[in-house]
Image: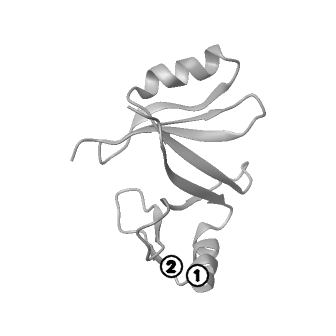
């Protein structure tokens, strides 16, 4: 199994406002009809990778994250820590059954580790 980048995510102080900006700029369709209210962006193209918008939180700042697909989120999160990185959000199951962890690399850049549920 390779480990492809599966999606992007923009964290924003006001994700509704920012997703509306990108929707108007690029004619993207934004859909938040899911258990977490995640604002998914439909770019209208089959090329590229999908993504969406999420709140940065009161202490957070705006940033772009990439999500890498792995076969074992817990194992890869532990490996990040072994290699000198850190775990920001520990491995967990999401409502639809996907697994996710947010980690930081050696430069402090955060990225996601994800395992998609079999559907």
Establish if 90 lies above or below 118: above
Q: Which sits in the foreground, 48 or 25?
A: 48
Q: Quadrant of the N terminus?
A: top left
Establish if 118 lies above or below 34: above
Residue found at the very far left of the displayed protein: 119
Q: Is residue 57 visible?
A: no
Q: Which sits in the foreground, 23 or 18?
A: 23
Left or right of 71 in this view: 52: right
Alpha carbon distance from label 2 to label 1: 5 Å
Q: What's the coloring here? A: one colour
- The residue drawn where x is 53% and y is 84% is 27
Q: Which sits in the foreground, 29 or 95?
A: 29
| Image coords of residue 33 (percent x, y) | 36, 68
| Image coords of residue 111 (percent x, y) | 61, 41
Q: Dot 2, how many residues are within 10 Å of its Cα: few (below 14), some (14-19), or many (20+)?
A: some
Establish if 84 lies above or below 87: above
Q: Is residue 113 visible?
A: yes
- The residue drawn where x is 46% and y is 61% is 38
Left or right of 41 in this view: 99: left
**Local secondary structure at mark 1:** helix
| Image coords of residue 3 (percent x, y) | 47, 36
- The residue drawn where x is 63% and y is 19% is 81
> Which residue position holds label 2?
28
> Which residue position holds label 1?
26
| Image coords of residue 88 (percent x, y) | 62, 33
Residue found at the very far right of the displayed protein: 107
Q: Which mark is residue 7?
A: none
Disc 2 and disc 1 in contact, CB within 8 angstroms: yes
Q: Which sits in the foreground, 68 or 16?
A: 68
**Local secondary structure at mark 2:** loop
């Amino acid at each position: 199994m390779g480990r492809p980048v599966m999606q992007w995510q923009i964290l924003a102080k006001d994700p509704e406002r920012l997703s509306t900006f990108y929707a108007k700029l690029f004619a993207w369709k934004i859909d938040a009809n899911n258990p977490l209210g995640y604002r998914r962006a439909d770019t209208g193209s089959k090329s590229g990778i999908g993504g969406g918008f999420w709140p940065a939180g009161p202490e957070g700042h705006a940033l772009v994250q990439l999500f890498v697909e792995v076969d074992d989120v817990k194992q890869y999160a532990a490996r990040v820590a072994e290699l000198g990185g850190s775990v920001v959000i520990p491995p967990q199951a999401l409502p639809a059954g996907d697994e996710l962890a947010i980690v930081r690399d050696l430069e402090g850049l955060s990225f996601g580790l994800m395992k998609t549920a079999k559907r």
